[in-house]
Image (cartoon, rainbow, N blue to C red):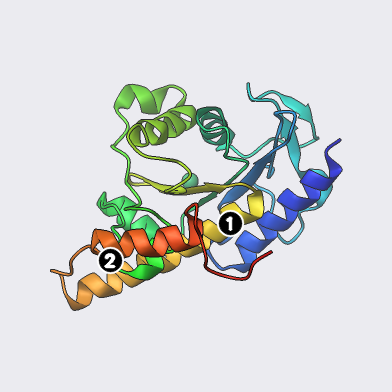
């Protein structure tokens, strides 16, 4: 079942690994099928030996529908995000070093330049810390819930990533591969911000007019960046 989507999720996971954002078995990518099933990387299987058929199919309650292996332990976080925003069709999770450094410091990644504005219409926020109850019980789904809480006043489509305090990055998009691409962009922007702030700790956030210009020309209603399809 869902052979095409399994292949796509498998390839997206390999892209994540070859991008250098993850080591060992860290990180995971999933996608949501048209009929509301989640295809996700299995837990703890090395990327080198992973096969498309190892991808696990689960429903939005987290029950395995098809697959021999256990799904990634972060599955409940993915499920909370799919439930929160219907346009999210792919999710990627990493502990990529620059972005995770911001998450560990509890600092959002603010738009300091146009590279950021080309992809994110505002800062990439960092969640609050989970409380002890949220950690003891349903830790992974509470991680998803705290992201959803952080996005109460934000738009998942305009800012397709979030830092989880002391943890790492979740990014999303219209497909698994696009979600991986967003994770790569988050890491690159985090690296640039780190370097910018090291050079000048008083660097200021991009003017709103420039943020608007760069975001809207790529993603707005009258987008004109790139070639006409
Ligand atoms: Zn993690």
Residue 85 in sight: yes
Q: Which SS class for mark 2?
A: loop
Q: Which mark is residue 120?
A: none
* Residue most extreme to the bottom: 199
* Residue most extreme to the left: 202
Q: Which SS class for mark 1?
A: helix
Residue 98 in sight: no
Nearer the camera: disc 2 or disc 1: 2
Residue at which label 2 appears: 112
**Residue under the point 85% across and 43% down:** 3
Left or right: 45 with respect to 198?
right
Residue at which label 1 appears: 180
Left or right: 64 with respect to 158?
right
**Residue under the point 31% across and 57% down:** 109
Q: Earlier in the sequence, mark 2 or mark 1?
A: 2
Q: Position of residue 142 (x, y in %)?
A: 43, 28
Q: Position of residue 61 (x, y in %)?
A: 63, 21
Q: In front here: 179 or 75?
A: 179
């Amino acid at each position: 079942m869902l052979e095409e989507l399994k292949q796509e999720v498998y390839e997206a996971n390999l892209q994540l690994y070859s991008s250098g954002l993850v080591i060992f078995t860290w990180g995971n990518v999933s996608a949501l099928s048209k009929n509301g099933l989640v295809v996700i990387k299995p837990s703890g299987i090395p990327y080198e030996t992973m096969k498309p058929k190892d991808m696990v199919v689960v429903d939005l309650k987290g029950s395995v529908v098809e697959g021999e292996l256990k799904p990634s332990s972060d599955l409940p976080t993915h499920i909370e995000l799919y439930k929160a925003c219907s346009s999210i069709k792919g999710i990627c999770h990493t502990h990529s070093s620059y972005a995770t450094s911001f998450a560990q410091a509890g600092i959002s990644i603010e738009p300091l330049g146009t590279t950021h504005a080309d992809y994110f219409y505002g800062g990439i926020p960092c969640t609050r810390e989970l409380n002890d109850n949220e950690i003891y019980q349903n830790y992974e789904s509470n991680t998803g819930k705290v992201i959803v809480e952080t996005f109460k006043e934000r738009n998942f489509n305009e800012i397709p990533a979030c830092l989880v305090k002391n943890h790492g990055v979740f990014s999303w998009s219209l497909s698994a591969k696009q979600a991986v691409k967003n994770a790569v962009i988050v890491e690159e922007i985090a690296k640039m911000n780190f370097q910018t702030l090291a050079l000048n700790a008083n660097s200021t956030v991009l003017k709103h007019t420039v943020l608007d210009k760069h975001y809207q020309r790529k993603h707005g209603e009258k987008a004109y960046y790139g070639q006409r399809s």
